[in-house]
Structure formats: C-alpha cells, structure tokens
Image: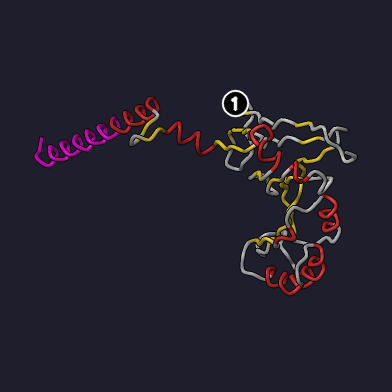
C-alpha cells in the first residue's frame, strides 16, 4: 500500500475514533442527566417544578362581632380600588385623559387638574389617590356606568362597622385592610378573630393555563371565630 493511502487511512481511523468517543461521552452524559436529574449540582426536576408551578393565596375571613340581637357590629366586607392603565400598547388604556378626568374626578374626591396630571403620566398604570380606595359596590357601579376606557377595579377586603359609633369604645377598630387591630375587642380578641390564609399550588403551561390531571396542593383557609356580645343599640 502506498504511503499516501496509509496516511489517509490513519486519518480516517483517527477521525472515526474521535467521533465515536464524542458520541459515547455525549450519550453517557444524556443518560446520566436522565437518571440523576441533576446538572452542576442543580436539581433539574426541582427547577422544572418551580418553573411550571404557581401558587395563589386563598384569603380567610376575619371573624364577625355580633350584638345581642344578631346584628353585625363589625364585619369584613368586599370593597374596590380604582386604577387606570395608560400604556397605549395595551388595548384597554385611557383614551382621553381630559374627558376621563372631568367625568371621574367628583366620584373619587379629586380635583380635575390633579387627576388629569395623573392620567397623562408616562407610566403603564397609575393609582388614583385615596378617594379611589375602599369603594363600595354601589360606588363602583356608578363609576362603571360612565364607561370610561382604561379605568379598572381590583377587589379588596375591609373592616366595616355598620352601626358606626355605637359601642365603638367597646369594639375598638382595625386598620381598613385589617392588617392591624387597635383598641377594644378588636385588639384583645385579635387572636380569635384573625383568619389564616390558605393557598393553592398547581402546574400550568407556558400560556399560564392550568394543566389537567396534575396534582393540586390545596391548603384550606381558616376563618376567624365569630364573637357574640350581650349589648345592642337599645341598651
């Protein structure tokens, strides 16, 4: 066999050996990852679970304080906070800041000029001041009747005292969002009245749609205890 042919054969054998070794190493690495589920001390299974698993809070409800006749003296109710989306790339944004400010200002106790300034900021969304917080359902519905593009609501819980000042020195009070109890029975019985939030964890796909037939982890919320007093508004 001539020398050039021997050289070509050796190079071919060397190349085949290198390719074979590379293939074996690559295959071994794939098998190792599939079996061990780990790369660089990172647990791939845990990473995948973390990426596709989401969790949401399920709020519990603070206990209600009743009077002798069964009337609610302190209770948790649903309220709403208005906000505005300004980004023009978002389909439902504020289209006419001046008109929106003129129509909405009186409903949230804000000057038209101040509201217009908020609605013309270079932000994705803005809060609309203290007057837009803790709105009742009827207030929310009145604003919705204005049909203002870009104005939205989010639900929030708040503490409500239907009889206003009646027995206020006994009941005490909490902050509106019930994050802090101050004075009276609200404070002294806070451990009993307080709720414990639950949670729901589940897997979803890349579009955020929950996956079917996947185990959900549900922790039920625990509502606070109700309290019954021996006082009423005729006492």
Report the residue at 70% width, 40% height from top.
Answer: 186
In the image, farthest residue toward the bottom: 113
Give how far across and how far down residue 53 sits, in percent: 55, 36
**Within-10-Å neighbours for mark 1: few <14, some 14–19, many 20+:** few
Is 10 magenta? The answer is yes
| Left or right of residue 208, residue 63 in this image | right
The colour scheme is: secondary structure
Q: Nearer the viewer, residue 156 or 13?
A: 156
Q: Residue 147 in the image: state x and y as whole percent.
A: 83, 60
Which of these two is toward me, 82 or 208?
A: 82
Span of residues in magenta: 1-24
Identify the residue position indicated by label 1 in the image.
Answer: 215
The dominant secondary structure in magenta is helix
Residue occupying the point 19% across, 34% down: 13
The residue lying toward the viewer, choosing from 129 and 155, is: 129
Q: Is residue 28 above or below residue 208?
A: above
Left or right of 134 in this view: 12? left
From the viewer's perspective, is residue 50 above or below residue 215?
Answer: below
Q: Position of residue 57 (x, y in %)?
A: 63, 38
* Quadrant placement of the N terminus: top left
Residue 79 horizontal side relative to residue 50, left or right = right
Q: Nearer the viewer, residue 64 or 201?
A: 64
């Amino acid at each position: 066999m001539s020398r050039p042919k021997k050289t070509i054969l050796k190079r071919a054998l060397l190349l085949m050996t290198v390719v074979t070794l590379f293939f074996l190493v690559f295959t071994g690495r794939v098998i190792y990852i599939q079996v061990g589920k780990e790369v660089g001390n990172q647990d791939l299974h845990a990473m995948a679970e973390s990426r596709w698993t989401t969790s949401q809070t399920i709020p519990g409800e603070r206990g209600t304080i009743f009077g002798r006749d069964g009337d609610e003296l302190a209770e948790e109710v649903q309220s709403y906070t208005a906000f505005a989306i300004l980004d023009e790339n978002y389909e439902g944004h504020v289209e006419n800041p001046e008109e929106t400010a003129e129509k909405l200002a009186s409903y949230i106790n804000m000057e038209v000029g101040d509201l217009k300034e908020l609605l013309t900021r270079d932000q994705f969304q803005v809060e609309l001041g203290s007057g837009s917080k803790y709105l009742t359902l009827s207030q929310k519905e009145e604003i919705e009747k204005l049909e203002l593009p870009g104005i939205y609501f989010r639900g929030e819980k708040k503490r409500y005292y239907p009889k206003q000042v009646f027995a206020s020195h006994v009941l005490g009070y909490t902050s509106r969002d019930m994050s802090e109890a101050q004075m009276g029975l609200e404070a002294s019985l806070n451990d009993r009245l307080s709720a414990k939030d639950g949670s729901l964890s589940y897997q979803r796909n890349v579009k955020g749609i929950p996956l079917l037939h996947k185990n959900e982890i549900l922790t039920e919320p625990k509502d606070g205890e109700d309290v019954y007093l021996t006082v009423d508004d005729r006492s």
